[in-house]
């Protein structure tokens, strides 16, 4: 897999430091609270595991699966809920965990859903923030790294369901794309 990567942007060590930094901040900001942590599958699976181990709070962990990108590098406006949560977020503080915020459409979809369900507060902790990709105005509250406007893979992020298990985030070589 390493041979398919043009450039490593964030290695294991720097991702670990980001998890420690944000974990401390979240622990401080939510002191005394018991937030619901909503991890967005599949992409956020590693970020969730690493960040949450740096959060010293009683949290309720939930997983939700939505779909916006259909395997390739291009985005689509249609977001669908693939696997919902079964617990009630009414009156709860919710922290959404994302691997990346790009167009912002996935996050907008989730924030609307949680607001409709009566969440008390909704904040977002993302490993990567691709601000240049935005199509809707939305901001993350906790950001690991700003990332430039390139299609990235690794550490949860896929290309056609591959590369999620790379331990770092990198840019895929152009010749690897087939669309
Ligand atoms: O800001 P956006 O442009 O909406 O993109 C961000 C979303 O895209 C990716 O998910 P994807 O739908 O590819 O599913 P996956 O997590 O299963 O890979 C990523 O994990 C985010 O959830
Ligand atoms: N793998 C991957 N998924 C995304 N979803 C939104 N942006 C990206 C990206 O740059 N890479």
Image (cartoon, rainbow, N blue to C red):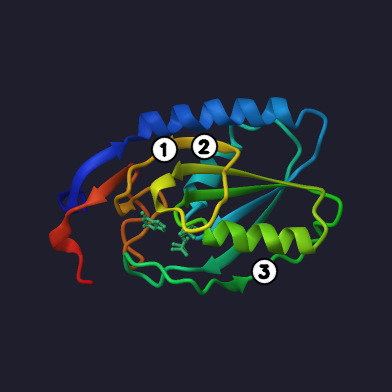
Q: Which quarter of the figure has residue 169?
A: top left
In this view, 17 is above or below 172: above
21 or 60, which is in the foreground? 21
Q: Are marks 2 and 1 in contact (CB under 8 Å)?
A: yes
Image coordinates of residue 63 in percent, x first then y, are: 63, 59
Comes first in the chain, label 2 or label 3: 3
Relative to residue 17, is residue 39 drawn left or right? Answer: right
Question: Which is nearer the eye, 165 or 88?
Answer: 88
Residue at image location 57% in from the left, 50% down from the top: 138
Taking 169 as reference, is 122 left or right? right
Q: Which mark is residue 84?
A: 3
Mark 2 or 3, closer to the camera: 2
Give the position of the C terminus as an image quadrant: bottom left
Query: Residue 144 at what x, y percent from top left?
Result: 48, 35
Q: Is residue 50 left or right of residue 168?
A: right
Q: Residue at x 54, y 61 (%)?
A: 106
Q: Residues within 10 Å of mark 2 (few under 14, many from 20)?
A: many
Q: Which mark is residue 143?
A: 2
The residue under the point 66% across, 31% down is: 26
Q: Secondary structure at mark 2?
A: strand
Write down the residue under mark 1: 146
Q: Report how far apart the C-alphas of labels 2 and 3 lie in the structure.
A: 25 Å
Q: Residues within 10 Å of mark 3 (few under 14, many from 20)?
A: few
Q: Is residue 52 visible?
A: yes
68 sits left or right of 112 in the view: left
Answer few, some or many: residues within 10 Å of disc 1's Cα (few below 14, many 20 plus, some between 14 and 19).
some
Q: Disc 2 vs disc 3: Cβ atoms closer than 8 Å?
A: no
């Amino acid at each position: 897999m390493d041979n398919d990567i043009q450039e490593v942007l964030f290695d294991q060590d720097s991702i670990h430091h980001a998890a420690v930094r944000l974990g401390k901040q979240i622990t401080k900001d939510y002191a005394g609270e018991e937030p619901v942590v909503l991890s967005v599958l599949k992409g956020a699976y590693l970020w969730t595991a690493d960040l949450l181990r740096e959060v010293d709070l009683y949290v309720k962990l939930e997983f939700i699966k939505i779909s916006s990108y259909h395997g390739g590098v291009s985005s689509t406006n249609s977001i669908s809920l693939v696997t919902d949560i079964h617990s009630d977020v009414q009156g709860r503080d919710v922290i959404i965990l994302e691997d990346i915020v790009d167009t912002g459409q996935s996050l907008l979809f989730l924030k609307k859903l949680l607001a409709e369900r009566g969440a008390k507060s909704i904040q977002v902790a993302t490993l990567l923030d691709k601000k240049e990709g935005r199509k809707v105005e939305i901001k993350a509250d906790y950001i690991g790294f700003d990332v430039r406007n390139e299609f990235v893979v690794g550490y949860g992020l896929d290309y056609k369901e591959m590369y999620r298990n790379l331990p770092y985030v990198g840019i895929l070589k152009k010749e690897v794309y087939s669309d």
